[in-house]
């Protein structure tokens, strides 16, 4: 996989070699150039660590990272690995602590990751101990630079990563900013482990075309239909993407005819006892009813009607990923609105009425391309050539946008590539 | 709990076994009928329980909404084709108040593919409130607390 021009048949990324999901060398490059490169990964939310001393474990690529709130209320992040012998330090997924002490030899660290204690450093009865020139100041934990946007905590390993807001660009800052414009209330976690390469999920959340075809619930109840006012947009580097939708901008009859004509839908439609499951109580400024905002490399912020959430995506080796859905509402929601959001959380997660299918679809791709790895996937919906924003969801261009920025970071972009 | 009316215990145990068997046999309408009209069904990740967060993996406040789940499953959802086997522990009846028994039962669900490969899909505990009236028992509430809250692949059929 050394010659980029041999990897990519086409400079506009409209062919994606299946090998990219299965090559261990590519996986190593991703860890090095992408997750530890000039990117901001979402670590978590400030609301997950509200109190002084709180921490939670997250992952940046393969690497377990602790983010925490110190005694002064500042947010810090460090790699969860003792500087001494490399043991995991924090062993509970979340907690509240005075300090971080490794159980192996009780080396002790502050919330900032500074080494503050080494038992028996001066030996016992004049014997043993560390050499006099051992400097605790030189042996803190590997820290990450941290920045926040409206309560979302980002971290980066690289000193050269551009400032967070310019990395995210106006589209993400504005749309994520609107969703996080008020103090939030956490409503719960949902986790799903899929036996597929992590990039298949990153493509999936940028694939505007599948959402109403694979997910029949979406098209039946008009949460997402190709006949609606909708689109797939990207930032100017094409690394982030937003798929969006206006519920109610098409007629049911018109939509049903379109899906019947293209042989997607049989002529039978389910109905629900509980219509509120798909109701959108308007709360966005411009009436947008669905936003799936992908933040490169590891996160998605979603608004699906009144179901709000952030997803952290974690690669667990080449052939497994974990999605952590974190549902939230606002602190000023009344009980009825909280109940509505909890009800609408039925639409997402591993049992989500409009998301469970992704688990199956991704495993189908992983299995079939692992068994027969030659060849490429076709990404031409919405057109080939330049990476442009389209006001339609019959559109896979954000998937090509992902590969463009990904290839640039990994140093595998072909000559004259679209970017 | 000692001193539970044997007739109540018998009804509780029958509901436990029947409701699990209905899922394994794919008789999901019969499974829905195991709930009272106001019956709740929640599949709750253990981490949310610990953090006292309300969101479930499945969250249905009434039997009508449980029925919606099954309609969607039959009609709209695509998922990994499989068979289920529920393995239940004996039930502990914690108390019986006004004809409603509070019951805890551990479960394992083994999933088997259509090509005959089995895996442990999940482990957890049912926290049930079961109303016993004469010779019938129905769920007033079933909370399936999932220890396996990092769900492998997806969760389509009810637990």
Image (cartoon, coloured by chain):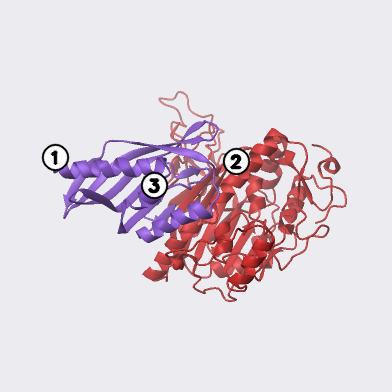
Q: Residue at x 61, y 46 (%)?
A: A361
Q: Chain of mark 3?
A: B
Frontmost residue, A145 versus B136: B136
Q: Secondary structure at mark 1?
A: loop
Q: CA distance from mark 2 to mark 3?
A: 24 Å
Marks counted in the figure total: 3
* Same chain, labels 2 and 3: no
Q: How many C-alpha atoms fall within 10 Å of the one at disc 1: few (<14), some, or many (≥20)? A: few
Frontmost residue, A13 versus A215: A215
Determine the colour of chain B. Answer: purple
Tell me residue A72's x, y (percent): 46, 58
From the viewer's perspective, is the residue at label 1 or at label 3 nearer?
A: 1
Determine whether label 2 and label 3 are within 8 Å by CB. no
Residue B21 appears left or right of A176: left
Quadrant (top left, top right, bottom left, bottom right) of the N terminus of chain B: top left
Tell me residue A207's x, y (percent): 67, 56
Frontmost residue, A243 versus A44: A243
From the viewer's perspective, is the residue at label 2 or at label 1 nearer?
A: 1
Frontmost residue, B111 versus A20: B111
Residue A370 appears left or right of A374: left
Instruction: Give the residue at mark 3.
Output: B46
Q: How many C-alpha atoms fall within 10 Å of the one at disc 2: few (<14), some, or many (≥20)? A: few
Instruction: Give the residue at mark 1.
Output: B2
Instruction: Give the residue at mark 2.
Output: A62
Quadrant for residue B23, please give it.
top left
Q: How many C-alpha atoms fall within 10 Å of the one at disc 3: few (<14), some, or many (≥20)? A: many
Q: CA distance from mark 2 to mark 1?
A: 51 Å
From the viewer's perspective, is the residue at label 2 or at label 3 nearer?
A: 3
Q: Chain of mark 2?
A: A
The mark that comes first in sequence, 1 or 3, is 1
Q: Chain of mark 1?
A: B
Which residue lies most toward the front here?
A: A267
């Amino acid at each position: 996989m050394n010659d980029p021009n041999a990897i990519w048949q086409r400079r506009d990324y409209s062919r994606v070699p299946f090998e990219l999901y299965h090559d261990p060398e590519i996986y190593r490059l991703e860890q090095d150039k992408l997750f530890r490169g000039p990117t901001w990964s979402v670590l978590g939310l400030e609301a997950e660590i509200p109190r002084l001393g709180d921490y939670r474990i997250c992952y940046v690529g393969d690497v377990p990272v602790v983010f925490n709130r110190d005694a002064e209320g500042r947010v810090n992040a460090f790699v969860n690995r003792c500087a001494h012998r490399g043991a995991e330090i924090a062993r509970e997924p979340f907690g509240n602590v005075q300090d971080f002490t490794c159980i192996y030899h009780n080396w002790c660290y502050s919330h900032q990751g500074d080494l503050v204690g080494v038992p028996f450093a001066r030996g016992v009865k004049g014997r043993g101990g560390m050499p006099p020139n051992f400097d605790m100041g030189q042996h803190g934990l590997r820290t990450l630079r941290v920045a926040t946007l409206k309560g979302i905590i980002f971290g980066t390993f690289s000193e050269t990563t551009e400032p967070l807001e310019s990395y995210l660009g106006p589209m993400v800052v504005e749309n994520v900013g609107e969703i996080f414009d008020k103090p939030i209330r956490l409503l719960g976690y949902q986790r799903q482990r899929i036996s597929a390469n992590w990039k298949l999920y990153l493509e999936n959340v940028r694939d505007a075309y599948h959402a109403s075809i694979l997910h029949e619930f979406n098209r039946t109840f008009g949460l997402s239909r190709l006949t609606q006012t909708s689109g797939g947009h990207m930032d100017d580097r094409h690394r982030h993407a937003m798929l969006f939708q206006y519920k109610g901008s098409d007629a049911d009859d018109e939509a049903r005819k379109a899906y019947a004509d293209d042989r997607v839908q049989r002529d039978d439609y389910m109905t629900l006892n509980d219509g509120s499951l798909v109701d959108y109580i308007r709360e966005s400024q411009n009436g947008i009813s669905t936003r799936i905002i992908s933040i490169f490399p590891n996160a998605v912020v979603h608004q699906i009607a009144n179901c709000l959430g952030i997803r952290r995506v974690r690669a667990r080796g080449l052939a497994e990923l974990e999605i952590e859905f974190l549902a939230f509402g606002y602190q000023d929601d009344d009980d009825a609105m909280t109940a509505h959001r909890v009800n609408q959380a039925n639409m997402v997660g591993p049992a989500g009425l409009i998301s469970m299918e992704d688990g199956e679809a991704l495993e189908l791709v992983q299995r079939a391309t692992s068994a027969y790895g030659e060849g490429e996937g076709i990404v031409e919906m919405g057109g080939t050539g330049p990476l442009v924003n389209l006001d339609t969801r019959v559109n896979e261009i954000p998937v090509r946008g992902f590969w463009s920025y990904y290839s640039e970071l990994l140093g595998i972009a072909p000559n004259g590539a679209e970017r | 709990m000692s001193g539970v009316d044997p007739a109540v215990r018998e009804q509780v145990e029958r509901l436990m076994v029947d409701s699990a068997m209905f899922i394994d046999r794919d008789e999901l309408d019969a499974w829905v009928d195991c709930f009272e009209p106001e019956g709740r069904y929640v599949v709750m990740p253990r981490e949310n329980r610990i953090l006292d967060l309300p969101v479930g993996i499945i969250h249905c406040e009434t039997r009508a909404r449980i029925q919606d789940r099954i309609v969607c499953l039959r009609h709209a959802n695509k998922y990994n084709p499989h068979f289920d086997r529920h393995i239940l522990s004996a039930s502990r009846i914690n108390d019986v108040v006004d004809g409603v028994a509070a019951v805890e039962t551990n479960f394992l669900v083994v999933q088997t593919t259509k090509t005959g490969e089995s895996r442990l899909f999940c482990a957890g505990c049912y926290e049930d409130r079961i109303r016993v009236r004469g010779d019938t028992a129905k769920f007033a509430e079933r909370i399936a607390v999932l220890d396996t809250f990092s769900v492998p692949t997806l969760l389509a059929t009810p637990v």
